[in-house]
Amino acid sequence: MRFLERERATMAKLLPDLDEYLQEVSLMELEGPDSPGIQYFRDFNGVRLVVPRDYEGRGATALDALRVQRALGSRTPSLAVATTLHHVAMATLFGLATTDDGKSNRWELVNTVVRDNLLVAFGFAEERPGAGILSPSMTATDAHVWDWLLVNGRTRPCSLARSMDLFAASVMIDGWNGPAMILVPADAEGLSVGGAGAESEQVTLDGVTVSKQQAVPWAPDAQPDAQPDVMLTAGFAWFQLLMTGSYLGAASTLVERVLLDNRVPESERVQLLMEVEDAMSAAEGVARRIDDGDPAESTLADSLYIRYCVQDTLSRVVPRAVELLGHLDSTASDEVGYLATFANGLALQPPTRSQTTGPLAAYLDDGPLTIA
C-alpha cells in the first residue's frame, strides 16, 4: 500500500468526493481567509463523520476518524485542526446522550444537530495562564425567569468561531455540583466573536440565556476541582488523538513531497517514511483502545504519551524534509515553509508537556490522572 493510500481511501469511503474537490484548490487558497474548505466539509458530510449510522451519520470509528483527519490534514491542515473539536463535541454529545436518564432532552439536542447538519464549535481546550484546561471559564446563574440560566464568560482560542452554527462549552452553574455542557446558537443575543484569527478566535458570552434543560451535567456528583468525569476524559482522549492525526497530516504532506522527489537519496526517503508511519501506528493503537471502550483514564494517559512522542517525531522529520526540499521553486518553497511552521503547532495544543509532567508522574506511581 502506497503512502497515505489507506487514509485517503478511508476519507473517500466515509466522505465521498471531498478529497477530489480539495485537490482542485491550491494549498495556500485552502489555507487562506476565503477558503472553500469549510463549505466542502459541510457539503460532503464532514459534519456527520463520527455520528452513528443509526442517527444518519457516517459512523466513523475513532480509528476511521484518525485516518480521515490525517488525510484531511495532508490537503488542508487548518481545516483538519479546526474541525477536530467539532468531532470531539459530537462524540461527547452522543456519549452523554447514551447515559440519558430520561429527564433531559439530550437526544433532542443530538437530533437537531444531525438533522440540520450543524457545525459545532467546542470551547473546552482553552489558553488561560495558570488555569486548568478542563476548568470551565464560563459561569451560569439562575435568571429567575422560568427555567433559564444567564451565562457569562469567554474562551479562547475557539476553532470554527466564524463558521459555527452552535457553540458548545463547559460551564460552572451556580448551585450545581459540578460543570455542565451547554449548547448555544451562534446567533444568540449576547454571543460575540472577536480576535485576529480567521477560524480560531475568542468567543464571549455576555448574559446569554440558556434553558436549564439544555445544560447537560458531565456527572451528577462531580466537584469543580475533582478528577474529570468519564465522558469528559474520553472526550479529551478523542481531542488528543484527532489533533495528533491532523498535525501528522500536515507533516505527511512534506514527507510525501520528499518521497516523490527522485533527486532525494533513497535512504533519506525511506528514513522519513519509517518515522511518520511509526508515529501513525502508535496513534492507531490509541484509536483502537477508544473503539474497544477501554477505561477512559488509561486511554487518556496513552493518548498523551503518544501525542508527545509524535511531537518529538515531527521535530525531527519536518526540518529534515524541509532541508531535502530546499531546491524547490519559490511557490513550492512558500508552501513548504507554511507546512513546516504549521506542523510545529502540535506542541502548542493543550495540555503542553510541561503541564502534564507532574500528573503523568503521579499516574505512573499509581495515583489518579488529574488534568484540572
Image (tube, rainbow, N blue to C red):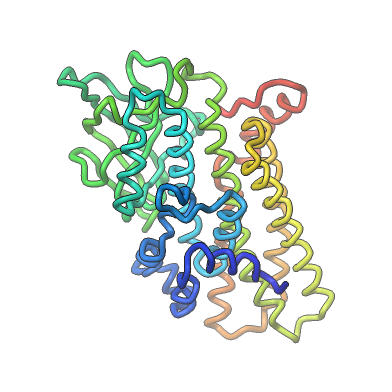
Relative depth, front residue between 25 and 137: 25
176 lies above or below 289:
above
Q: Measuring 40% from the left and 31% from the top, which residue is drawn there?
A: 170
Lateral position of residue 62 relative to residue 28, left or right? right
- In the image, residue 65 lies at what x, y percent? 56, 54
**Front residue of this view, candidates 137 and 82:** 82
Q: Nearer the viewer, residue 190 or 283?
A: 283
The image shows residue 346 at horizontal and vertical percentages of 59, 52
Residue at image location 29% in from the left, 50% down from the top: 165
Does residue 37 sit above or below 290 in this rendering? below
Relative to 323, 116 lies left or right: left
Q: Residue at x 36, y 36 (%)?
A: 107
Quadrant in the rendering for residue 203: top left
Image quadrant where one finds the C terminus: top right
The quarter holding residue 214 reads top left
Q: As drawn, is 86 to the left or to the right of 259? A: left
Does residue 148 lie above or below 157 as drawn? above
Question: In the image, what residue occupies the spot 50% across and 67% down?
Answer: 76
Residue 218 in the image: x percent, y percent?
A: 45, 26
Judged from this view, the residue extending furthest toward the right is 267
In which image quadrant can residue 255 be found?
Answer: bottom right
